[in-house]
Amino acid sequence: MPVIEWIDEFNIGIECIDSQHRQLVSMINNLYEVIRSNKDRHPAIKKSLDALIDYINVHFSLEQNFMDRICYPKRFEHVEIHKWISIQVVSLCDSYEKDKNSLLAEELFEFLSDWFVKHIKSEDLLIKSFLDQTKTQGY
C-alpha cells in the first residue's frame, strides 16, 4: 500500500509537471518499501536515494523553466525553496551515507513525504492559481 496516495488535488494542470509529481510520489513510496524491507537494505536505500536526488533536480529544473516561461511572479521565491529543499535532502543523504543508520533513512523518508505534500499544497498549487487567473484575464 502506498504511503502517499496520489489525489486529484495534487494536479496543477500542467501534464509534464503533474507526471513528474506522480513519479516523485512513486519514488518516495518505493524508498519507504526499501527501508521497511528485511533484506540487506543499505545498498538499495542508497540506490533509491541517489535516484530520488537526481529526479528531484530534473523536476526542479523543469518546473523552474516553466515558471520562467509563464513569467510566474513568485518564481524567485519558489526557486529559493527548491534550493533549500535540495540542500536538506543532500545533507540528510550524506548523514545516512556516513552512518548507514535506518533511523536516518526513515527521517529522510519523513522529510520527503512531508515536503512533497506541503510543497504541492502550499507552493505548486499557486502556479495553478496564477495560470487560472491569467486565463480569466484573457492573457
Image: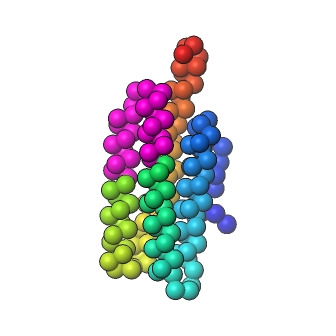
Residue 107 lies in quadrant: bottom left
Q: Residue furthest bottom?
A: 39
Please name the residue shown 45% across and 59% down the image: 54
Residue 88 lies in quadrant: bottom left
Left or right relative to 85: residue 66: right
Q: Is residue 37 above or below residue 73?
A: below
Left or right relative to 92: residue 24: right
| Foreground of the two, 81 or 71 | 71
Image quarter of the C terminus: top right
What kind of secondary structure does the magenta stretch mostly adopt? Answer: helix
Q: Is residue 70 magenta?
A: yes
Please name the residue shown 52% across and 50% down the image: 117
Whether residue 112 is visible, yes or no, is no
Q: Is residue 36 magenta?
A: no
Give the magenta range. Answer: 60-85
Please name the residue shown 45% across and 73% down the image: 46
